[in-house]
Each structure stands twice: as structure tokens, then as C-alpha cells.
Amino acid sequence: MHEANPCLSEADTGSDTSSQAWRRFFARTIDLSVNAFVLTIVWTYVAGVFAQDTSNFWTQIFTERENLVPNGAITTVFSFLANVPFMAYYGTTLGKWLFGIRVTKPDGKPLGFKLALKREFAIFVRAYFLMIPWINLITLAVAYETVKDEGQAPWDRDYGLIVNHRPQSIILTLVEASAVILLFVFTLWSILPPDFDKMS
């Protein structure tokens, strides 16, 4: 099994293992958003290589009704699976690194691929309920209350994992606030209509 990167290990493993549900939620949201964006970039490259008309390619992907469900499913599954290699060998992801979070086995070692995959699947099903709208809001609320009351998420408890947080500091607070603001701006920008600037 690969050991965690020493730099990540020092930076992200803190002595604070308390419940910090909001830090974890925003870290996860950033990871899912970044992973979806990466997938979009890859699809754009594929379209440029294989599709004769790139604009028509994207029109078919995002506007034709029969493509909406499979497109959403592919993006969702990729957004979760893309976390697995990082969690397996480093115990952290971009979002978790920004919020000073690292997940390890009790001995401090990385999860390994199999355990990281099982954990990600558990989060996908138990916290996000397969990303089914409205229902997942309920399961997320339940997961939040569990972390708040018990100090750990059910999947971490079930697999005997330790979630470490960097001690809060002014710098970490600024980084977290900046990440949340950028996430909000990106989300708002992504849902605006393409011709929003022309609307009056």
C-alpha cells in the first residue's frame, strides 16, 4: 500500500477530530463541483477531436431531453468516483485540503483503494441518496445531524475511520471563506441563461 504524501500528511493531519459538519459539507460540495467541471473539460476535448460540429455536440448533450438523464447520471457518478484515488492514497481531496480535512485509518495510514471506494459509495447512497432531488436534502440533513450529535459520519464510524481537522486559524478561515464565495459565484454563473447579459 502507498504511504500518504509527507507534505499532505503534515499539512492536513491535525489533532482536532471533533465534529465539524459544515467544513465537511463545503469541502464535499467543492469536490463534486470541481470533478464535474473536469469532466466537462474532458468532454469538450473529446468533442473537439471526434465531433465535426462542436456546438451541435453540446446542444445535443445539454438541450435534447433524452440526453438530460444519462448526462446527469454520468456527471454525478464521475464526480464521486474521481475522489476515490485521492482518498485512497492521500486521505484528502482538493476540497478537503482547502478545509484542512484528512481521513485515515486509526493507525494514520491511507484508506487504500477498496476502502475509499466503499466509503464513497456509502456517501453517495446514504448522504446524497443517489442525488435524487428533494429526497437527498432529507438524507443530507440526517447526515448533518448525525455528525453534529455523534461527532462522526455513519460511514466513518462503520469503517472505523478517523477524520482529522487542521486547527482553526485566521488563514484557514480566510481560505475557507474564499472557497465558499468562489463556489457560490461559480454555481450562480453556471445556472444563469447564456444570454443573461443581453436581457433587460
Image (cartoon, rainbow, N blue to C red):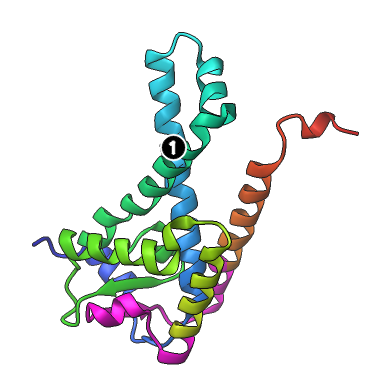
Q: Which residues are magenta?
A: 148-176
Quadrant the C terminus occupies: top right
Residue at the top extreme of this rendering: 52
Left or right: 121 as drawn, with respect to 167 = left
Q: State yes or no: residue 52 in magenta.
A: no
Residue type indicated by callout 1? Pro
Residue at the left extreme of this rendering: 1
Above/below status of 13 relative to 37: below
Q: Nearer the viewer, residue 105 or 170?
A: 105
Quadrant the N terminus occupies: bottom left
Q: Element type at marker 1?
A: helix
Q: State yes or no: residue 153 in magenta.
A: yes
The residue under the point 38% across, 15% down is 49
The residue that mark 1 highlights is: 70
Q: Quadrant of residue 182?
A: bottom right
Q: Measured from the top left, where is residue 112 in percent x and y?
A: 16, 63
How many C-alpha atoms fall within 10 Å of the one at disc 1: few (<14), some, or many (≥20)?
A: few
